[in-house]
Image: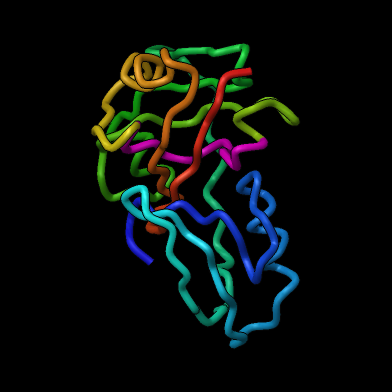
Amino acid sequence: MKAGDVVVSLDGKIIKESRDLSRLLFEKAVGVKVTLGVVRDKQAQTLTVVTVDRPGAKPAAAKPPARDVSETRDLGLQLEALTPERARRLGYRDTKGVLVAGVVSGGPADRAGLARGDLIVEADRSAVQSPADVDAALRDGSALLRVMRREAATYVVLTRE
């Protein structure tokens, strides 16, 4: 796997939302080989990987936003600027990115797999430093977001409804 790969299937089962991938992976035993269909640089590829234990640590809950906030109701998403104090409190070493301060259950951001406490570091392969950067990337209706959860990176596609 490489950064930016988009998983489209797992053992032949189509992945429509990031939750589909998580659900299918959680059904697998640790140490099992699985076949992933991915799109890398607009080319379909098949990869074989071995499942491993999921890290148990969850990000700490973020405090309600105070300032530098963006609320996108049609996405069910609330973003806030990341300060050094917030980064430290949440366990992030880097202080670049935009913090997910809130996610509406069942909304587009939730279905994409975003969660409160996530750190968005890129939108459409460009670094973001403010909620406005993420909003700008979503102007066309969808964006590929690189998201950090503690030290693990993942990609999600967020689409406006």
Q: Is residue 129 or residue 154 the one in the foreground?
A: 154
* Residue at x 40%, y 48% (from the top left corner): 148
The quarter of the image holding the N terminus is bottom left
State which quadrant residue 39 falls in. Answer: bottom left
State which quadrant residue 115 falls in. Answer: top right
Residue 140 appears in view: yes
Q: Work out which residue is located at the far bottom of the displayed protein and give it.
A: 31
Q: Horizontally, is 53 left or right of 93 in the view? A: right
* Residue at x 37%, y 13% (from the top left corner): 68
Task: Give the total of numbered labels.
Answer: 0
- Residue 138 in the image, given as x and y percentages of width and height: 43, 19
Image vertical order of residue 153 relative to residue 78, above or below: below
Q: Is residue 126 or residue 153 the one in the foreground?
A: 126
The quarter of the image holding the C terminus is top right
Q: Work out which residue is located at the far front of the displayed protein and give it.
A: 43
Image vertical order of residue 110 relative to residue 76, above or below: below
Q: Is residue 99 or residue 138 the one in the foreground?
A: 138
- Residue 73 in the image, given as x and y percentages of width and height: 61, 12
Image vertical order of residue 143 relative to residue 37, above or below: above
- Residue 77 in the image, given as x and y percentages of width and height: 57, 22
Q: Which residues are magenta?
A: 111-123
Residue 150 appears in view: no
Magenta stretch containing residue 48, yes or no?
no
Q: Is residue 47 or residue 79 the one in the foreground?
A: 47
- Residue 37 in the image, given as x and y percentages of width and height: 52, 63
Q: Horizontally, is 125 left or right of 146 in the view? A: left
* Residue at x 64%, y 27% (from the top left corner): 108
